[in-house]
Structures are given as structure tokens and as C-alpha cells.
Amino acid sequence: MRWNILLIRSVIEIKIDFHVHTQWSHDAFGDFSEISRWARFKGIDVVVVTDHEKVTLSKPEVFNSIKFIPGIEVKTIYGHVLGVDIRDALDMEFLRVNPIDAIHESGGISVLAHPFDINRGKKPQRSMKIDAIEVINASVLLFNFNFKHSRAYAKMLGLPETAGSDSHMPPTVGDAFVEVEDTDFDEAMRSVVKGRGRIFGRPTSMKNKIKLNLIRLAKRNQFSTIIK
Ligand SMILES: [Zn+2]
Ligand SMILES: [Zn+2]
């Protein structure tokens, strides 16, 4: 008699911050170890590393039980675009010419970041081949304005929603995130793109915004002292 063994993998609730900068962005601070400690404290399971114009991680890594996923944030004619869960090497030349196709060719998911931020946003276009819209970004100037309009646009275009802190220093990681039920950490981001995620977030506190600007100022002064 043959027995068919059915493997049942239990479903877990996974919290993902889709938009996090590290010290490898010119305007951000904190290494993976510091970020992972804060992510744990905030109850985040997965952090997508989206440094400016570069893929910092070549493959997923785990620090302090937090999973870090390769990603990027690029400036494009459509506004800022996130490449999430980059699986193969990203062709940087092609990225400059056709960012969304380049992200797709590397196995990544393309997300339009903070489309309604006053100084950094650009309204989504119907012709874009984008996979999702970042509806919550914790760092935008006008949080509710960006949220309301991004949500309406995602709905209009029939695209799934994501959320990310756009953290530039460890204490702000997890200020916004997506929660999704899945059996697998590696597939969780794909489930979000299928519309199975729930988004949460709050604006990054004024205290942390001031702190970030003070650290940036101190860093700039340090550099100017060295140059002198
Ligand atoms: Zn941005
Ligand atoms: Zn960003």
C-alpha cells in the first residue's frame, strides 16, 4: 500500500517594509545590523533594501533573523521607481534607458514610489508597465494627501498597493509596511503584487525627521572640514 504524504506548510503573517535606505545611500545612515535591530523592535520580518541608483545586496541575506531583500530606487521620467526583489544582475545601462523593463528582466517587481509627494512625486501614467503603486510612504511631506491620491490612482489603474517607510536611518524602519499571509518569505512579495497584501503606516515622527537632518548636517560639516 502506498501512502501519499501531504506536506502542509503553515501560513504565516509576514510584515514587509518595501522601501528602506541604508548607509550605502549618500543621504542615509545605518548598517544591516542596526537596521535589523530596529526592524525586530518594530515587528518587521522583511526589509527591501532600496538604495539610490544601486543594488546594494547581490542576494537575500539574514541579519538578526530579519530577511533583507535586494532592491533599488531609481530616478526615471515617471518619477522614482523601486525595483523590488531583484533576482538576477541588473543591467545598469539598460536601466538608464528603460528602467521598468530592466527591473523586469532582472526578475524584479517595479513599484512607483511616492507618486504624490510634493517635491519628488510624479503622477502615474496609464501607459506605464508598473506592477504596483506605493500608496503609503512614511517620509513624504504631506502624508494624508499622498495616501489619498495614490490610493485613488492605484484603484483607477487597477494596480496593487504597497507601503514602505522610505527610512534613511534605523529608527524609522517599519514606519510603513505591508502585511501578507503566505507560506514562504521568498514568495511574500509576489503575493503582495497579486493584491493579497494589507498596507499600514504612519508618518515618520517630526523628532526623527529633525534627527535625520541633524545627522546629515553633521556629516556634511565633517566632510567640509576634511576638504579644508
Ligand atoms: Zn524616492
Ligand atoms: Zn527612497
Image (tube, grey):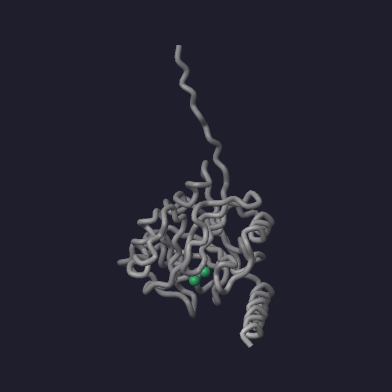
Name the residue at 59% across, 50% down.
62
Q: State the residue lying farthest toward the left.
A: 127
**Quadrant location, the N terminus:** top left
- How many circles with numbers are drawn on the protein? 0
x and y, in percent, of residue 46 in the image: 57, 53
Q: State the residue lying farthest toward the bottom.
A: 228
Q: State the residue lying farthest toward the top.
A: 1
Name the residue at 52% across, 51% down.
60
Instruction: Answer with the quarter of the image where residue 165 lies.
Output: bottom right
Classify residue 199 as left or right of residue 105.
Answer: right
x and y, in percent, of residue 193 in the image: 43, 54
Q: Is residue 5 above or below residue 129?
A: above
Instruction: Answer with the quarter of the image where residue 222 lies.
Output: bottom right
Q: Is residue 191 above or below residue 171?
A: above
Residue in the foreground of this view, choosing between 12 and 109: 109
x and y, in percent, of residue 61 in the image: 56, 51
Instruction: Answer with the quarter of the image where residue 212 lies.
Output: bottom right
x and y, in percent, of residue 78 in the image: 38, 72
**Quadrant location, the C terminus:** bottom right
